[in-house]
Image (spheres, grey):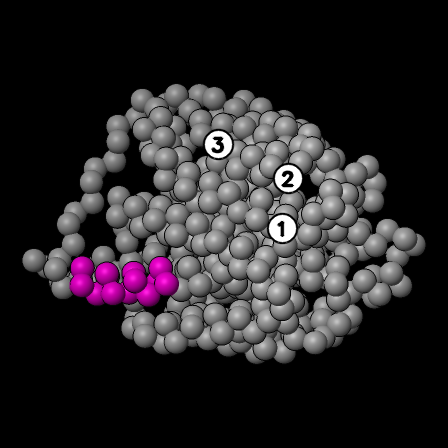
Amino acid sequence: MNRDRAYFLLLNIGHFLDHLFTLIFATVAALTLHREWGVSYSELLLYASPGFFAFGLFALPAGWLADRWSRDGMMVVFFVGIGICAIATSQAQSPIQIGVGLFVLGMFAAIYHPVGLAIVSMKWKNTGLRIAANGVWGNLGVAGAALITGYFIDHGGWRMAFIVPGLVSILVGVAYAWLRWDGIWEEHRAPRPAKAEPMAPAFRSVFVRVSAIVFVTAAVSSVIYQSTAFALPKVFDERLTGFAARLSDGDVATVIGSLAFTVFAVASLAQLVVGLSLDRFGARRVFMVAAVIQIVFFASMPGLRDGWALAVALGFMLGAFGQIPITDYMIGNMASGAARARVYAVRYVVSFTVLAATLPLISVVHARWGFDTLFVILAAAAAVIFCAVALLPRHLPTPESQPAE
């Protein structure tokens, strides 16, 4: 493998690990910790919320440091820092301690999206395919969290689900530093890019209107993504236990984790289909189809169990994962240069802050009404996305389309 391929592989592994670490606790809380510590699942969710706030809040300073020092240097900090933090979090003896550990872990997890994705989008020419492939790796991290954590719960305990990936991340960080050591300091000494040209007033008006729609859909999409990605192991624990017991020899947690992994992994392939469809059909049509898929399957989920619940869960995850690259695609087409970096940074902060606010929603809804009510809420959220996307112009404004001043 040449150095360029190794570079891209390590960046993809970083996206995998980023989503893996942020969702280990979801499976731990769902399958074992509520029994071990005598704390309800709904209460445990509240201790994870600060970590997701950190995931969003620290995206801006991470991008700022990367611009003024080195993107590759920040990636080394990400790999080593999140690995050490995961190992430390594994030693938590109380909900407060694990909440603190998840908060610091969220600080390091915040580095990847504004830094790693910036490298992917700027380093190579075939950006669309690279971003789609990188996105699949991130979704596999979501899937891997359920699979790996479920396995360690049955074979070694939940603490190993933090320790082993933590050691792997540190080793990957060492490999990344070795591969990019010269590039880190060359990047640090390189001149900073020039500022973007100001927008024409007419273009700015359309850009602001479309951006508002983009950020609304990004926020609502984050509610759907977080609710499904975080809660699915618990949903399966409640609705597929009998189904999982028939497939296992007692390792129910492993089977539930495997089923969640399968749904997440298959659904992640929707990103590739969406990526190929965006250039052909446009963001508006593709986004509306993704919203309709979610409305139909979320509305069908209440009351289902076993095989039907598994099939419908796959359906709504196809829509939830498929919509992920659409807002990034729209931002990438509308903005350029420094403006693109700023809009992406704001998009990450909005999305990841909403991720944190979603956990109290799941906690309250699950404790009072159960997951059936949550699925009704998510169907309504998908309907909001459909209505917002319908207001988009058929052709997005681009820097090239703005009138000359």
Q: Residue 171 in the image: state x and y as whole percent.
A: 63, 27
Q: Circle 2: is it few (<14), some (14-19), or many (20+) Cα within 10 Å?
A: some
**Which disc is residue 43 wearing?**
1
Q: Residue 262 in the image: state x and y as whole percent.
A: 71, 58
The residue drawn where x is 73% and y is 42% is: 37
Gap in angstroms between the C-alphas marked 3 and 2:
29 Å
Residue stretch in magenta: 204-216
Gap in angstroms between the C-alphas marked 1 and 3:
33 Å
- Three-letter residue code for mark 2: Pro
The reply to whether discs 2 and 1 touch (Cβ–Cβ < 8 Å) is: yes
Residue pointed to by mark 2: 95
Q: Circle 1: is it few (<14), some (14-19), or many (20+) Cα within 10 Å?
A: some
In the picture, measured across the screen, residue 197 lies left or right of residue 128, that is left
**Which disc is residue 239 wearing?**
none
The residue drawn where x is 83% and y is 40% is: 155
In the picture, measured across the screen, residue 286 lies left or right of residue 390, that is right
The residue drawn where x is 45% and y is 49% is: 352
Where on the picture, by quarter, is residue 153? top right
Quarter containing the C terminus = bottom left
Gap in angstroms between the C-alphas marked 2 and 1:
9 Å
Q: Is residue 153 above or below residue 253?
A: above
Pair 1/3: label in front: 1
Pair 3/2: label in front: 2
Dot 2 or dot 1, earlier in sequence: 1
- Three-letter residue code for mark 1: Glu
**Which disc is residue 75 wearing?**
3
